[in-house]
Amino acid sequence: GAGVSQSPSNKVTEKGKDVELRCDPISGHTALYWYRQSLGQGLEFLIYFQGNSAPDKSGLPSDRFSAERTGGSVSTLTIQRTQQEDSAVYLCASSPRPSPRYTEAFFGQGTRLTVV
Amino acid sequence: QKEVEQDPGPLSVPEGAIVSLNCTYSNSAFQYFMWYRQYSRKGPELLMYTYSSGNKEDGRFTAQVDKSSKYISLFIRDSQPSDSATYLCAMRLTGGGNKLTFGTGTQLKVEL
């Protein structure tokens, strides 16, 4: 596709339910990132994939959060037993193979998660 | 204290004004500095990036990095209503991966 695609665009869930958020990166991009943007906060790094492996998952806030990537393409972020503080916009970004020099990360439109 | 500090605004200016947006940071190891623009309910899009210290100009936009002061700026000349958005500064270290550390963003409104 032309850009990074995320689904669903919006998700309302009840506290305690599990949710899955999906990201389709730009074709050929080997690096994929998940960020979280809460109201009044900047983007907070969650996890980074290079291919199917996650060399940096230091930003996942708790063991309720997990992510996987298959086929070096689609990624799913799963939040178990959702809490109200999980309400935020979850943004996915992809970039070509990282190098010591900067490579641009392209962002999707995000999934707006509301836990009620 | 956050690694990257940015005034959230909102900042309101008249059309045609020069806008100055700024961030300070604490980690002297940051080498790459970016400015992203985010329209409401959209993902951030890269506006400019700079490596190490210095200035970079692109049309109406100028990015400045002062590593000695740990201070970066984005200037917008001849601001337009279409520039109304949230501007996020972001930084990364040299090395593998592309993990970005963001400021909170400054909300800008350019009034007719």
Image (cartoon, helix red, strand yellow):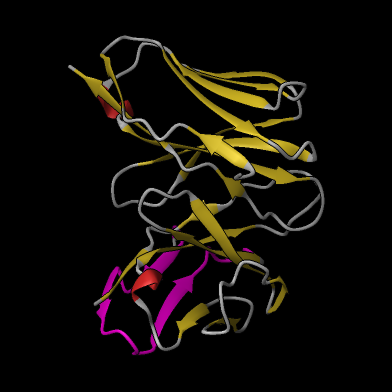
> Which residues make up the magenta segment?
A2-29
Vertical comparison of B96 with B71: above or below: below
- Farthest residue to the front: give it: B1
A19 drawn magenta: yes
Residue B39, quarter of picture: top left
Residue A65: give x, y in percent of width and height. 53, 80
Residue B90: give x, y in percent of width and height. 59, 41
Q: Residue at x 38, y 89 (%)?
A: A18
**One can see residue B68 in this view:** yes
Residue A48: give x, y in percent of width and height. 65, 67
Viewer-closest of A4 and A48: A48
Q: Is residue B22 left or right of residue B64?
A: left
Vertical comparison of B2 with B59: above or below: below
Vertical comparison of B104 with A22: above or below: above
Viewer-closest of A5 and B76: B76
Q: Residue at x 44, y 39 (%)?
A: B105
Q: Is residue B99 left or right of residue A87?
A: right
B86 drawn magenta: no
> From the image, which quarter does the N terminus of chain A lie in?
bottom left
Vertical comparison of A49 with A39: above or below: below
Q: Residue at x 76, y 46 (%)?
A: B93
Viewer-closest of B19 and A81: A81
Viewer-closest of B102 and B40: B102
**One can see residue A28 in this view:** no
Residue B81, quarter of picture: top left
Q: Is residue A100 left or right of residue B110?
A: right
Q: Residue at x 33, y 27 (%)?
A: B83
> From the image, which quarter does the C terminus of chain A lie in?
bottom left
